[in-house]
Image (tube, helix red, strand yellow):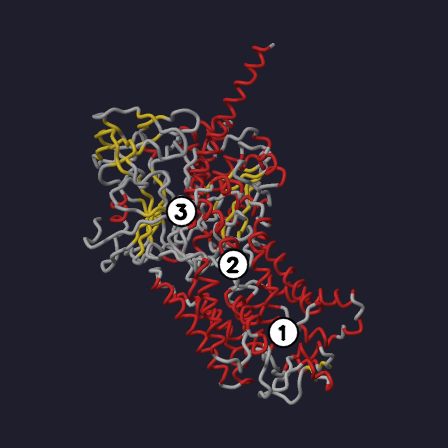
Amino acid sequence: MKKLTFKRGIHPSDEKYFSKDIPIRLIPATGDMVYPLSQHIGAPATPIVSVGDEVLAGQKIAEATGFVSVPIYSAVSGKIKAIAPHQTTTGENATCIIIQNDGQNRWINDTYRPDYPDRSDSDYAEKLMSSERVKHMTAADIRAAVREAGLVGLGGAGFPAAVKLTPPDDGKIEYFIVNAAECEPYLTSDDRLMLERGDELLYGCEILLRLFPNAKCLIGIEANKQDAIRSLSEKAEKHQNIFVKPLKAKYPQGGERMLIYALTKRKLNSTLLPSNVGCVVINVATVITAFRAVTLGQPLTHRIMTVTGDAVASPCNLEVPIGISYDRVLEAAGGLSPDADPEKLITGGPMMGTALFRLDLPVTKTSASILAMRRDPVAIDDPTPCIHCGRCLSACPERLVPQTLSAAAENDEFDRFEALGGMECIECGSCAYVCPAKRHLVQSMRYGKRQTGAIIRARKAAEAAKAKEEPEKGGKEA
Amino acid sequence: MSLPNSTMLHVSSSPHIRHEATTQSIMADVLIALLPAYLMGVYAFGCRALLVMLVTVVACVLTELIYQKLMKLPLTVGDLSAVVTGAIITVNMPANIPLWMPALGGVFAILVVKQLFGGLGHNVMNPALAARCFLLISFAAAMTTFPETFRTLFDGAGVSAVADSGAALDAVSSATPLAALKAGGEVNIFQMIFNTHNGCIGEAYPPAILLGAVYLLVRRVIHIRIPGIYILSTVGFICLLQVISGNTALLTPGYLVAQVCSGGLLLGAIFMATDYVTSPITPAGQVIFALLLGLLTAMFRILGGSAEGVSYAIVIGNLLVPLIEKVTVPRPFGVTRKSKKAKKA
């Protein structure tokens, strides 16, 4: 089959061999759990528990604040210890609900457990699917279930899933796209999910397809995951309207705009949403969690993380309780290699992930991995002058000129930054990856985007205020 | 799980991995690619070519080192860019040049053209070519006098000089194929391509230059766009100009082969027009730049007084790069002409 892809991009070594053959293992919740109220894009959740309250695992501890927001659930049973600022992976002190874990793992409802039902039963997913309740669920019921489960996009940004699944016009959606590219090097959790929970994924697609009467489902998988492609293609045969599409292994194939282009040849820019071109894009893990939310009413309490890198004793894929601290996850994975003294710890992939400065930080809904590297291949590089080689330009999937843009940002020329299309940057890191002068291109781009974004917002607010003023004036004169 | 006590974690912005290519490795690739052409120059013109290389490279590196020491700047000779400049000046010199001339050229290239403009990445002209033009203007005779005797791979010459046209040629020098061609010489295609011939050190043997080009293309140091379009458009514009000036009879295949294989066109197109710092970064800009070089080279060769024109063409092209880049910024992915206009309005 022809492999689909986008233009430009880069080919970093995928490094997935560390953990790609290790089955997902559920780890117990240990230690106090910390839940930042803002683990998603949108308004922070509002706590509905107070200090001293007893909670059970699977119990809601914070409620969504408005439409673009999600509730938060506890993954353990215990007592609310504090609602106070706690440091998170971004370095800021965010308000968190801190739960003293009683270690008894008492659930509010046993069907909310992450290991329910027994997956050794080969048609468990089909059985869940064929219940009368699920059969009769309407689109509104499905959206409500996803919303109530606290589900966000588990691939990266953490946008509330229910909002993504609610485009302005359901009938205009032609493609329901499952992002299974997993183009970041090292990460293998989506790969494992497709191999081990393929049925949950496909039935999940079937359920979500009900929301969009005119859509067909495309599952885009990079060609370096042949086993997943084979297994899902076989299974997809008995599902109507679901198609597995192999993609060329190239970074950033899993970027939303790149994925949509590869699968449909439709183009998006920063001012458009996927629904503007008839698409909805959802990550693999998100579809599976949505399946469980709809069929079992299960809230999002656990997620899959890859623990990997050359400084890790035994790389693996773990199903971890959200709220646990990173050092407990690393401990459960078997810790660091005895002789390793890692220079860098990363959460997320090496291209877009965040460097960790300590490990006693909470795992959130969007924590994808712990990547421990013995040697840090970048922080030691001093940037040298740009030699104008143009590699950044041929790598940029957004067809920008990163060299010129980063120079504009560094010189605070934000008008020029905007005119050159700087706001289109998706911060994928391809330009910095290829730069032979080792310049901090992404850093400059982020700075430029932040400053320019503020200027644009201020301008729009001023325009809106002016527009409001003018008709009033006109009214007075008349 | 606590980290070892000695652990000092690095924190930096993403990405956390990088490609292994560095400025230094790219410069090293250019030097490797120059090697075949240069070695054939040593074969053709003798050990004197080694001396020219030594003097020029030492002059370039020392100039950079001393300047940076005096100005208390970070020392960057390790990036090999000064060595590349020296090597490119060398392959553009006749082998019998008085040694102080390329040394002076090296000092001029590094000091005036490169460092005074801000060092690597900030020069507006290719330092090596600017130095060659500087020497060409200052010492025209020495720069265009090529040694009379040299070793060839086969007997015979690419272009046989016409006996009575010797007036244009110096008594102790032999003509370059292009000079002989301008004087009305006859072309032997096989000899032109596969025999060593007269000229600068680096342009003795076209296949060796092409070997270097293949290396650079395979290593993705350069893209075919600039050299390919430059060479083809030079040939195209030469044909056009000859047709306009009514010399259609001149346009034999042999004539065109000689135009491509001589006069520094291959060397210029592959090693100098592709210089990163002084060529456009945008794909459309590279096309315009290469076409412009082709036009200028053809004009200098056909309409100008001298037989050659590559150096001047590239140096003039270099100066236009900022303008070319300004008008060829690509439209970002997914941004249509319409949506861009709507944004402006």
Residue placed under numbered mark 1 in the picture? B263
| Kind of residue indicated by mark 1 | Gly
Q: Does residue B83 appear left or right of residue B255 in this picture?
A: left
Residue placed under numbered mark 3 in the picture? A443
Q: What residue is rendered at 55% in x and 53% in y? A: B322
**Residue A214 x %, y %:** 60, 34
Q: Nearer the viewer, residue A298 or B83?
A: B83
- Judge whether A328 appears above or below B214 on screen: above
Q: Is residue B106 visible?
A: yes
Q: Chain of mark 3?
A: A
Where residue B124 is drawn, which disc sits there? 2
Q: Does residue A284 appear left or right of residue A209 in this picture?
A: left
Q: Is residue A132 visible?
A: no
Q: Does residue B200 appear left or right of residue A308 in this picture?
A: right
Q: Secondary structure at mark 3?
A: helix
Q: Chain of mark 2?
A: B
Q: Residue furthest left?
A: B5
**Residue A421 x %, y %:** 53, 42
Q: What residue is rendered at 41% in x and 74% in y? A: B58
